[in-house]
Image: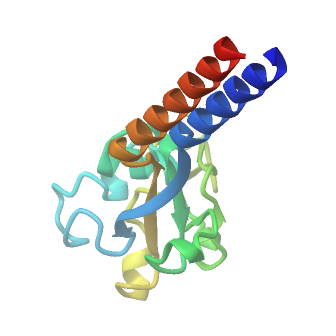
Amino acid sequence: MKTKLKTAIFAAVLGLASAVTSQAGYVFVGSWDLATLGGAYGNPSNPYLWTNNPAVYNGVEAAAHLFGGDASDYAISTIDADVANINHLAFVDGWADSQYLFNPASELFSLDMGNPGYNDPAGYASAYSALVVDHAPGYGAGRFVNYAFRQVREVPDHAWTVGLLGFALSGLAVMRRKLNLA
């Protein structure tokens, strides 16, 4: 008889644990275009303009900077705003090198050699950032857009969890009553 009680308790705990387990997913939160970021290319007050020596960011760091949170919360795509198309790549521009505008790099790639900042490099191709306006405006808006997706946790409705807990506890009560009567 005690085996039945142990089995009932195990089933109740397993059911409750599965009810409160959360699953991770992503939602689209926004995008940025390396050609139009921060406004007009010729605007000297644009904080992302390469001549203003902006900080260097990889794709997920850029998303956290623009939309808040931690870089580890984000995934980046170069395809579109559809969660199903996340490719974990980012358009990245380089100091004197635009190769990653045409061949996107990993969402985790950036490079900042020399002093901090995009426009204080140690030489050719020594700074790459996903949050800079440099070569992209010359190719036109809409070609180099990074799409940001933030990780969310899907938690079941509290009423469902409470109901499941109540069901499990009532089952335990019935099992205990049966064991005590026998």
The residue located at (81%, 19%) in the rendering is 1
At x 58%, y 77%, the residue is 85
Residue 98 in percent (x, y) is at 58, 71
Q: Is residue 92 visible?
A: no
Nearest to the observer: residue 154 or residue 38: 154
Q: Dividing the picture into quarters, in which one does residue 182 lie?
A: top right
Name the one closer to the observer, 89 or 70.
70
Name the one closer to the observer, 181 or 97.
Answer: 181
Task: Give the residue at x 39% y 45%.
Answer: 64
How many discs mark residues in the rendered view? 0
Within the image, what quadrant is residue 131 found in?
A: bottom left
Compared to 92, does 164 lie above or below? above
Query: Horizontal placement of 176 versus 95: left or right?
Result: right
Left or right for 100, reference 164? right
| Residue 44 in view of the camera | yes
Judged from this view, the residue extending furthest toward the top is: 180
Give the image location of residue 30, x and y in percent.
Answer: 33, 65
Residue 69 percent coordinates (x, y)? 37, 39
Left or right: 85, with 142 as reference point: right
Q: Position of residue 77 (x, y in %)?
A: 54, 69
Q: How is the image coloured?
A: rainbow
Is residue 141 placed above or below 74 in the rendered structure? below
Q: Residue at x 21, y 71 (%)?
A: 42
